[in-house]
Image (cartoon, coloured by chain):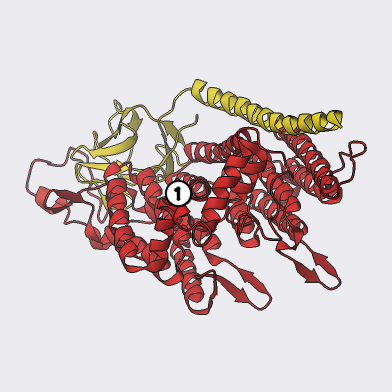
Chain colours: A red, B yellow
Amino acid sequence: MSGRWWRIRPRTRRTELQLLVLVSVTLVVGAASLGATLRYQAALAADKTVGTLDLLPPDPRALAIYIGALFAVHAAFVLAGRRIDQVLMPAVGMLGGLGLLLMQRLPQSLVSQSFGDAVLGLGQLQLAWLLIALAVIAVLAVAVRSDAWLRTYKYTWAAAGIALLLLTFVFGSDVNGARLTLSIGPLSGQPSELLKVILVVFLAGYLSENRSLLADESTRIGPLRLPPIPYLAPMVAMWAIALGIVVVQRDLGAALLFFAVFLALLYVATGRPSYAVGGVILFVVGSWVLYNLFGHVQQRVDNWLDPFRNPLGSGFQTVQALYAFARGGILGVGLGAGLPTIGGRLPVPAVHTDYPLAALGEELGLIGLLAILGLYLVVVERGLRIAAAAHDDFRAILAAGLALVVAVQAFIIAAGNLKLIPLTGITLPLISYGGSSLLANALVIGLLLALSDPGVEPPPPPRPARRWLRRPGRRAARAGGVDAPAIGDAVLPGAGR
Amino acid sequence: MDGFVLTLWLVRILFLVLLYLFLFAVARVLLRDLRVAARGPVELGRLVVIASPHAEPPPGSTFPLDAVTSLGRDVNNAIVVDDPFASSEHAVLTFRGRAWYVEDLASTNGTFVNGVPVEQVAPLGFGDELQVGEVRFRLDRGRG
């Protein structure tokens, strides 16, 4: 460890620096627009005339701190001298900055927490979480130089994940009918956010080790050709866990996310469309059964099919979000000019966690929404590029999985907000308010950055595959025959190690 | 008053334009990155020698792989494994579609993937270990 630090040479990262400058300029202009609009609206409401244009951001100090933190992370990367990806961090910084602007613009009393005398509102809390998330990204990207701790202990990670899930089942508290939140003392968090990272790590380890066996078709049930039965068990277990999350935790979003990521990774690892098709069939069957058995699933689907049947009751959120998108139109009404409250109530309930896209769609319009989706696309592209350049299967599947987790989550909530699929309450990655969500996504981004360094430690030799599936070798069959040892061939005793 | 609204509108539009400017800059970087990756020589994979008791091939050496690469003790093989336990024509590695496969050419002592004997043909993933005689290799992804 000791002789290591002096060998690190700083390495300039010009692309990242240029992109970060562009990010800061964009955020400053956005904040200026937000501040001016808010003052204009306030003056209109008070029936006063508006004097000169005042472009001061609503909370200039918070913005300065955030931009400063982005450049601090950049400086840390430069000093660490690793050849990590230069695009990912600015894209994430932009998404986080948009989230910060949105949280500064929503009513600050939505969430508040007091530390001693100081009471922090929504914007300040989001800033605090963003700073912690950036720190997590920087530490992971600089410090993680080997993936052995993920690769070797995959079953330990899986056990920890299941334990976390069970803890939430037993000790979790119900919020809006879903049992998601786990509180330990003053801290509370949503374990399912962390669980998605653990799931990807486990799947990467499991699939890379058993890739060839999963691509095998040795079992036949009628017309179906399946891989060896013992290797199917984890998949069926995965499906059961996803259903269990829906039944016990009532968390449709997490279940959908886990199952979709699982199927995508299975396809990435084996290259067999039949797995994906089989998984989708299982999903349809499971959904149909759940729809008929459980009221909360039925309600979600009914709201999706026809939210206007009960626009003031169960369909309220969906209807209001659709109105917000409609008000936004193509160019949007401008940051700060949307409807903050109607009669002291939020127009879209849970706008800061589940519906940030509705608020952004109203204020930035279709153009702004497409830009935000483009930012997610950039994150995914980088993840898949890192996967394609990875040295071995574990890293490739891990990087692809991390990117897909962000992509699938963004898709599920964006499509839910836009009434493309039934709404499932999960957060919009890197934009939504919430500590658990931001930290889990920071873990994802930090790991992706660490994996993008082509100089990460070479992978250790794989362990021999488990013996209990070894088919009787052809060694015995061969003994009498065709293959007489060529001259000079020595026979190796126990060559299999 | 009108000037005020107009300026506000311009600032709003400027914000959206800057968002797209950022995306445009990113897209340029990504395109450059993809071009560089596409231009480099395509190497399908490489074998790294992990252990070789008779130092032929020497441990740590790497062999870039062609779509069909033969291994064995005979000098006509692409990768010569000069090991007493290797057959003269021991095994052949082939790249089919998007994956590597190893075929055992009825060798005396067999070919092993991660310690499991290969029966005729077996898929070989990146990071997997291949044993020919007493020589152990690891299949790595190629550069570019």
Name the kind of residue labelled 1 in the image. Phe
Residue most toward the front?
A47
Front in this rendered view, residue A149 or A27? A27
What secondary structure is marked by label 1?
helix
- On screen, residue A112 versus residue A234, left or right, reads right
Which residue shows up at 73% across the image and 59% down it? A122
Residue at 38%, 65% in the rendered image? A241
Which of these two is toward me, B57 or A243? A243
As drawn, which residue projects farthest toward the left?
A: A480
Numbered disc total? 1
User: Could you tell whether A293 is left or right of A117 in the image?
Assistant: left
Which residue is painted at 31% across and 31% down in the image? B97
Residue A178 horizontal/vertical position (percent): 50, 69
What chain is tagged by disc 1? A
Residue B84 visible somewhere in the drawing:
no
> In the figure, A272 relative to A146: above or below?
above
Residue that lies at the very extreme toward the right in this rendered image: A51
Foreground of the two, A398 or A364: A364
Q: In which quarter of the image is residue A338?
A: top right
Instruction: Measuring from the top left, give residue B100's x and y in whole percent.
Output: 33, 37
Q: Quadrant of residue B135?
A: top left
Residue with the most extreme top position: B39
Q: Is A467 drawn above or below residue B1 in the view shown? A: below
Quadrant the N terminus of chain B occupies: top right
Residue A359 against residue A238 in the figure, above or below = above
Q: Where is residue A92 in the image (x, y as percent from the top left)?
A: 65, 44
When asked about the image quadrant of residue A234, the answer is bottom left
Residue B32 point in image, percent of width and height: 59, 24
Neighbor class of circle 1 (other Cα within 10 Å; few <14, some 14-19, many 20+) is: many
Q: Residue at x 58, y 43 (%)?
A: A325
For disc 1, the marked residue is A394
